[in-house]
Image: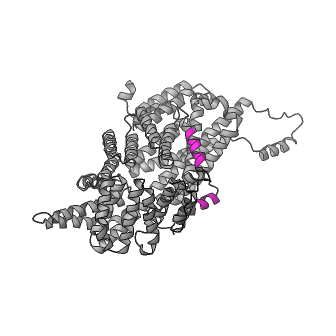
Amino acid sequence: SQCRITMTTEESSKFAIDELDDSLSEDSEEDRLLLLEAEDVYHAIIQASDLIWTFEFREAEFLLAPFKDNISVLMQLAEIQAWKSSLDETDENHQLALDKMISLESLAEATFNKYQPQSVAVQKISSFFRSFMKKDEAPPPPVDPEVLKINKRRQLEALSVLADTSGALAMLHLRKQGFVRAANYVRKAWKHYKDAENILLHDDHVKGDFLLTERGKNIASRVQFGYGLFNYVISMLPVALKWIVEAIGFQGDRDKAIADLESCSKLVPSPRSTWASILLVGMRWFFNDEEEEGLRLGHELLEKYPTSPLLKTTMANLYRRRADLEKSNLYFQQSIEAASAFPQFKLTAEYELGHNFFLANRWHDAIPPIEDYLAKSFSKNFKAFGSYKLGICYWILSVEAEKEDPPNKERAQELRSKIDKLYREIPKHVRSNMSYDKYAEKRAALYLKQNGWSELDIFFVSIDNMLEIKNFDEATSLLDQSIPLVKASHPENYAHWVYLKGLSLKKQHLHEKAKNYFQKVLSLRANITQDTWIIPYSAVELAEVFLAEKNIKMANTAIDVAKSFPSGYDFEKHCSMKIKKAAGKIAKLPSSSTPDSSSSSSSA
């Protein structure tokens, strides 16, 4: 305790390592390795992984310093650097994380090869050459079974680290848009996790009591989480991409993903159990609509890590999805306070709070946190879409300025000049693989082309916000009042209005009425040339309505309509996830759930 207070991380590390080196000076290499594989080493990894959730990185590094020659400890230290990189977004920390992971990858590969048993082919060749040995030359002694067991476990540990480093390197390259390098590391990670799982399942040297030890749990949790995450992500890919990745050897199985993640979450204590629990919260919420269970798991994790800024942000997002902005705002505020020492993470939490204000149509309140994020964040996350939202807020304030008595034209012009500058800079923030970025670029171009937002442009944004936070009474009233304005405008605006009306009814569980509006959108598809995304989205919403009625035949028909829509529309990835969710629900329904639907089949 005194050391933790008075020493820097570097000094404490040197102190602890020197002590360890002294104690091992007379020991053999094997004794040294066995000491580094003791349970207290893996207990330190667990303690360090707990500290990471509360961003106590120096304390975590101090705990691990005495055992830095252990390969799993080195993995945890490299992860800490990756966390630092993700939290401050600086190029310096990003490069440090890359360097640590690349160095560890080489070490893990060398360790894996060192303990790799001879293949059958090599054994046969060795046996052949031994047959020519002199008769008085003794054959090599048989390998001690205990040594075989030790070596296999070391090999598996190295393989689990190799898989984790490959996955981490993929994410680090993705963060900087290095897609080719990331793809190479994704392929490596998949192979390593798959090989490691095969050893866990079928090799007797790593079964039994070993998996009950903290070392065994450390290895198994990394493998189960990594393999489960891969299965989950691949299972969520759009059909157009899924067949490609499966053709080159990847496989996606959501049921196996859930089984692996649930198993990992129960490997307590372990470095990946909390990660698995968080992922299960999201999967239960999104795929199974188990909101209460998701919140229960979230609160359970928060009880374990009550000061974790990341978990507070997670809870804030869950309550936002539940349209409980009051609780969501509270958790974002708590996250902001808990992350005071990490300005980049704090900026992100403040931006998310600003997004809540935007959803509540609190334009004045949304401006400061979004402005702050755009000005100070090192990350490209939210830069494009945040700029688009900020422009919406500025425009509404400029209209209010014009309506003042007397009109404040100078203020209105000042705000519109800000919008022009903001929107002209959006293209430099756009990431090619992010649909919200591309949508922001498209909308900004429309604004600049028509020199402002129309009344209906702002109307549709406001209604969409109201529906997301379940403000149905006001949304319904405004939708009904706007009918004359909408019908007098371009036919595409009417199609957008019809979609929002159907969405409002569906969210209120008025399914029979909602079906008519979604079917109407599909019949108007010839008029829709700009916001074409409302066509596949209407088909998916229609499928969900039919699912609620247990009408599998019509749900499948609607899903086929959504799937057949040409790729390249806005928010396509999210629509693909909705399609996957609907298809998953259909698979769980009995095939006999096909009530008569002749009245709506032709429309669908």
On screen, residue 309 versus residue 19, left or right, reads: left
| Residue 221 visible in the snapshot | no
Q: Which residues are magenta?
A: 242-262
Q: Position of residue 449 (x, y in %)?
A: 31, 74
The residue depicted at 83 percent of the width and 42 percent of the height is: 127
Q: Residue furthest left?
A: 406
Q: How is the image coloured?
A: one colour
Q: Is residue 278 located in the magenta-colored stretch of the structure?
A: no
Q: Position of residue 88 (x, y in %)?
A: 37, 47
Dominant secondary structure of the residues highlighted in magenta in the image: helix
The residue depicted at 86 percent of the width and 40 percent of the height is: 133
On screen, residue 337 versus residue 317, left or right, reads: left
Q: Nearer the viewer, residue 35 or 444?
A: 444
| Residue 457 vertical placement versus 131 (above, below) | below
On screen, residue 63 versus residue 166, left or right, reads: left
Examine the image and state in which quarter residue 498 appears: bottom left
Locate the N terminus by quadrant: top left
Q: Nearer the viewer, residue 528 or 362?
A: 528
